[in-house]
Image (cartoon, rainbow, N blue to C red):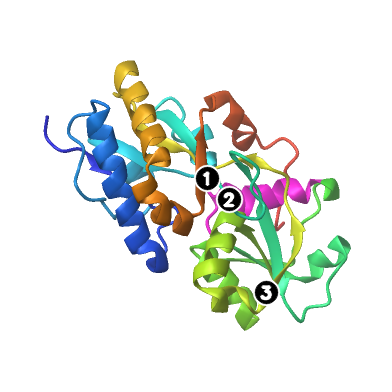
Amino acid sequence: MNARMASLPMYDLPELRQATDEWWHGLAGHFRAAGVVGVPETLHRPGEGLATWLHPALLLSQSCGYPLATALRGRVRLVATPCYDLPGCDGPNYCSFVVVRRDDPIADIRALPERCCAVNLPESWSGHHALRHFLAPRGDKPAFHAVVRSGGHRQSMAMVARGEADVAAIDCVTFGLLSRHAPEAVAPLRVQWRTAPAPGLPLIAGAGLGDKELLALREGLRMALADFRLADARSALGLAGMAIMAESDYEIMGSDAGGGPLLA
């Protein structure tokens, strides 16, 4: 079989590129040892998005949970959900940190309608929909007077830090990794609230993956997590384990029930 495609785009920060590559190199070896064929030597880095996740040659990638419950539903296979050893994570679950500038005195959620919110992408759970659900007690009232799109969590943080926005919901894994590896990005901010926990960002495979190969991928993951030679890479990436979850665990992300508007 020709080499397939693999990507790990969701937490592939520039500061972690070497660790991500080391992790993949180890994973790839364990996948082959478990019987997976066509494992690519290197990661494909086109960025996240449906074109990558629905590519016919996809072997493995990591997506946001919201697309898994919506546009990707029935079109990919759920392999596993990583567990991260970072603040805000609990096993395979994570949350978003609602951040403001460190010198912003805001403490009452009722002040948010006077503020501007930075949203990474409309299809993001952690940067958009988790915040909608967090603010659901406001009913159908708009949560902010303005909403700006940043294109990414790191960009949202930078916009808040520069005063171009007042608040943003940041994936706690991204926030934790930046706290470790790029503290200057986090220093101007503080965490004011946390959203409710939800299933973390899943590892997915192409829809054509058979049951036998799915089990082989999971076995390769298990072996890589136990490989002492990959300890430094796992530590840098905050990886602590993997959980096998059902697609139904992600259904809450595909429902608008309980979520209010960020902007009228």
Q: Secondary structure at mark 2?
A: loop
Residue occupying image coordinates x 60% and y 28%: 249
**Can you identify the residue that label 1 sits on?**
240
Left or right? Give the position of 105 relative to 263. Answer: right
Task: Name the quadrant containing residue 26.
Answer: top left
Task: Identify the mark nearer the N-term, 2 or 3.
Answer: 2
**Place of residue 98 in the rendered image (x, y in percent of width and height, measured from the top left):** 70, 61
Q: Please tell me whether mark 1 or mark 3 is closer to you in this view.
A: 1
C-alpha separation, residue under disc 1 versus residue under disc 3? 26 Å
The magenta-colored residue range is 120-136
User: Is residue 181 rendered to the left or right of residue 25?
Assistant: right
- For marks 2 and 3, give the CA distance: 21 Å
The amino acid sitting under disc 3 is Leu
**x, y (%) of residue 28?**
26, 41
Q: Amino acid at mark 2?
A: Asp
**From this viewpoint, which residue is outermost toward the left?**
2
